[in-house]
Amino acid sequence: MVHHDQEVLAWLLDSDPAIRWQVMHDLLEAPDAACAAERARIETEGWGARLLSLQDADGQWAGGAFVPAGFTREEWKTSGQPWTATCYSLNMLREFGLDPKSESAQRTIALVGQNCHWDEGGQPFWHGETEECINGRTVADGAYFGADISGIVARLLGEQQPDGGWNCERANGSACSSFASTLNVLEGLLAYEQATGGTAAVSAARRSGEAYLLQRHLYRRLSTGQTADERFLALLHPSRWRYDILRALDYFRAASLFSGSAPDPRLGEAIEHLRSKRRSDGKWAPDWSLPGRIWFPLDDGIGHPSRWITLRAMRVLQWWDAARPS
């Protein structure tokens, strides 16, 4: 560790249970019992308890699956996409690490299955939506919390593009993949494999999606080698459906730990860019933020150090450096 890491770790631990238990587990390798005890506090304290308290009586958030009840296209145009409905609230609870076996989690998943229907099509929530990005995150949530999302997984396997990835614009005629859609689906498929053991078809699809991103070094155009989108190199949290290299690196870390494989050297450019974003105090800060309705902020905003981004960056670099010693 560099000289300021101990101070950064203390700063991370002086936080919410959702941060603390992951620091203990991912960075400090604390005993399982201690990690579990800290994780259990998410249900009753801090961000997790606060988000659960905002849940509707029928198990939804804000009265809708993808957008809040009564939300209008005009508000989307003027204020941005909202992030308070059920799907994004479940994303947050999964990211916090709410114990799937907890009473709150079990109750929520059952009620969402009974009462929540997608805005597009009206199908039950755990049957999936129509877009690959949304369905990838729904698979991740369902797999994590124990819902049956096997039907969505089968659909995603049938929607993979010839180049190996996925694209939400496929239904509109797109024949090539996108970075964001591909990562959303990959996260879902990995969660499905972690929860169920997966199948050979799921593993093969995930490897093809990973190859799509690795061939592009996580952020470059395959055709020219140029940066595909400058925002891929800009750090963001919460990511929602958006793509950046830290989110991609965190996925590849999780996939590597799951499979027992070494980090792919093609991640190296993104790793070095991530190192370059570290502040002199050893922390990382968001470069931008998404507009739109939120329940509550999770950090202090652009230009201020973010515990979420710092946690994710440190665990990625710790994994990379341990596996690829200099």
Image: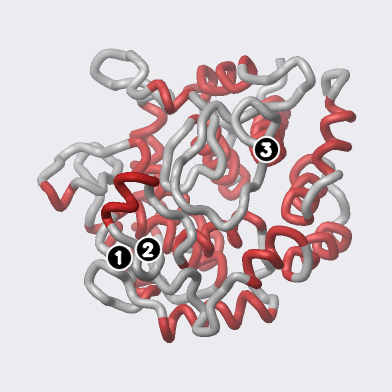
Residue 81 in view of the camera: yes
Foreground: 181 or 325? Answer: 181
Q: What amino acid type is highlighted by mark number 2?
A: Phe
Left or right of residue 179: residue 283: right
Above/below status of 121 relative to 296: below
Question: In terms of secondary structure, where does tag 3 sit?
Answer: loop
Give residue 127's position: percent from left, percent from top. Answer: 33, 74
* Image location of residue 77, percent across then percent down: 30, 46
Q: Is residue 319 visible?
A: no
Which numbered disc flags the more N-terminal residue, 2 or 3?
2
Screen quadrant of the C terminus: top right
Tag nearer the camera, 2 or 1: 2
Q: Determine the residue positioned at 76% across, 15% down.
A: 280
Label pair 1/3, CB-CB below 8 angstroms: no
Q: Position of residue 8 (x, y in %)?
A: 82, 31
- Which residue position holds label 2? 66
Considering only order in the chain, which callout, 1 or 2, is on the residue closer to the N terminus? 2
Q: CA distance from mark 2 to mark 1?
A: 9 Å
Residue mark closest to the camera, 1 vs 3: 3
Figure colour scheme: secondary structure
Q: Amino acid at mark 1?
A: Glu
Marks 1 and 3, how far apart in space?
Answer: 33 Å
Q: Viewer-proximal residue, 74 or 68?
A: 74
Quarter occupied by residue 210: top left
In the picture provided, is 228 more to the left or to the right than 289?
left
Proximity of marks 2 and 1: CB atoms separated by less than 8 Å: yes
Tell me the tag on residue 129. 1
Q: Quadrant of the N terminus?
A: top right
Image point 30% across, 54% down: which residue? 132
- Label 2 sits on a secondary structure element that is loop
Query: Looking at the picture, does residue 6 appear above or below residue 307?
Result: above
| Residue topped by disc 3 | 300
